[in-house]
Image (tube, rainbow, N blue to C red):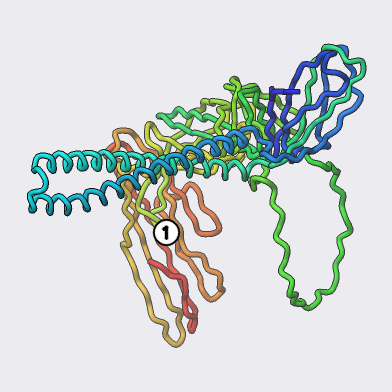
Amino acid sequence: MDAPIVTVTVYPQNARVTRRCQVTPADGSRVEIMGLPLSLDAASVRVSGAGDALVTGVDVAYAQHAAPADPTLRALVEQRRTDQATVDEVADDESAAAARVDLLTGVSRRSGASFAKALAGGDAEPGRVQEVSEALSTQLAVALKERRALATRLERLREDLAALDRQIETRSAQSEQDSSTIVVELESPATAEIELSYVVPGARWEPGYDVRVRGTDVTVTSYGLVSQHTGEDWPECELTLSTARPANTVVIPELQPWYLDRQQPERRSMVPPAPAAMAYGGAPAGRDGFAAHLSQVEQGTTAVTFRPARPVAIPSGAQGHRTTLAQLDFTAELDYVTAPTQAAEAYLRAKVVNTGEHTLRAGRAAVFHEAEFVGSTQLELWAPGEERELALGVDDRIRVERELVKRSASKATFSTQRRREADYLTTVTNHSPREAVVAVLDQAPVSRDDSITVRDLRLSPEPVERTELGQFTWRLTIAPGASATVSLGYRVDVAKGVELSGWRE
């Protein structure tokens, strides 16, 4: 019995497929749904229904086929047989045309010599010789043209056949030759609707984002990237994306004894270690859930599900099929950040707070500023009320210059230390038409040896942040066309006989 797919729920590492069919008393007490993926999890099969029939048993059987079980692959293989027959026919025609060209070429060569002798001996009329020569030339030209046309057609047919072979190879890697059959036993068969579902591996989904910044307005479009290699095409149907992770075995974690023992000498083994097992997809697991404006969202106890507003069709072999889930609007606080010790450039930065009700899962994000693509970044888990920073690229209108304005070094004597001093001046100029807030990052060296001392820090103005690792942050508010400066100086004392490493200017 044919049971079309009506719903697909995709999990991070597999998918549950739901099919539905109508049964009548004429179908008897045994219903078989055939041609299902061989890799389906038999323990996950569930059957329910509506009507007067009673389901008394469900079983999973397996069938071997001479032809591929996948109908799409079977159609491709049949198409290849047809195309190969066409290629063979055209190849035969091309061989016949080539033989005709060879025949006419040989006749023309031999007749040319005979005509020359006949004309020299006066045994042939010139007009008749010319008529026969033109007829041979015309036939040879037609034969050559036919051979060229057949050769061109044959080349194109072979290219199409090679493309079809690549399709078959790709589809064969995703499909099985054999298939599963779900057998449903009914008692008191009557008109009823049967719904069956099963879990298949080879499917996954992961979140992705488009982040667009226009002025202080930020639009985050979230979408699901669905990949499936289950061996069956999912037609246009209701698609659900879930963060749940169905497993064959579910256990509660328990602590095992924690033993301490004497460390034993390492023994070399000639057997290489077994490779670590990897879950399908390889994507790291994270906390789940996010707001959906373009799809329905359901927050469960341990998982979140999303239902796109429109039915979606996803063929087997799809990689990263994109399904839009939500569009979220936030407000950004814009400023600039520069670290002139790394690069004399100012980067535009957007600070955005998640003012929504749900958490955004970790995923890859494409960032756009106005109409320009800035680049891609990894968006970390983003909880409601949490702030995230987005880099929007270099703004050349904010010019940064850092220069060494003072440098001194003293040599050690018999009783003194060596001393080094340095002073730097960083100038930031705002060439944009608007006021700019610029965070300037700089640092002083940090000693990891008692014989090396960093002292006499000279900071102007006072930084708004400082760390124990010698890192400082200033926040400068600069009017259009104006400049602001930051100065940093320090002294390093080195004990006698100690060689200093790590110094840079």
Picture coordinates of residue 64 (x, y %)? 75, 40
Instruction: Give the side of residue 485 with respect to residue 252, left or right.
Output: left
Labels in figure, total: 1
In this rendering, the answer to whether 49 lies above or below 157 is above
In this rendering, the answer to whether 118 lies above or below 291 is below
Q: Nearer the viewer, residue 471 or 50?
A: 50
Name which residue type carries label 1: Arg
Quadrant (top left/top right/bottom left/bottom right) for the C terminus: bottom left
In this rendering, the answer to whether 360 lies above or below 280 is above
Q: Nearer the viewer, residue 98 or 81?
A: 98
Instruction: Give the side of residue 339 with respect to residue 251, left or right.
Output: left
Picture coordinates of residue 359 (x, y %)? 63, 33
Quadrant (top left/top right/bottom left/bottom right) for the N terminus: top right
Residue for badge 1: 458
Residue located at (49% from left, 79% from top):
495
Task: Answer yes or no: is residue 401 visible.
Answer: yes
- Toward the bottom, the furthest residue is 414
Q: Which image quarter: residue 276? A: bottom right
Picture coordinates of residue 248 (x, y %)? 81, 41
Q: Nearer the viewer, residue 59 or 163?
A: 163
Task: Answer yes or no: is residue 482 visible.
Answer: no
Picture coordinates of residue 198 (x, y %)? 77, 32
Instruction: Give the side of residue 404 with respect to residue 49, left or right.
Output: left
Q: Which image quarter: residue 283? A: top right
Residue located at (34% from left, 68% from top):
407
**Which SS class for mark 1?**
strand
Q: Which image quarter: residue 59? A: top right
Q: Label 1: few (<14), some or many (≥20) within 10 Å?
A: some
Residue located at (9% from left, 50% from top):
119
Instruction: Give the side of residue 400 with respect to residue 235, left or right.
Output: left
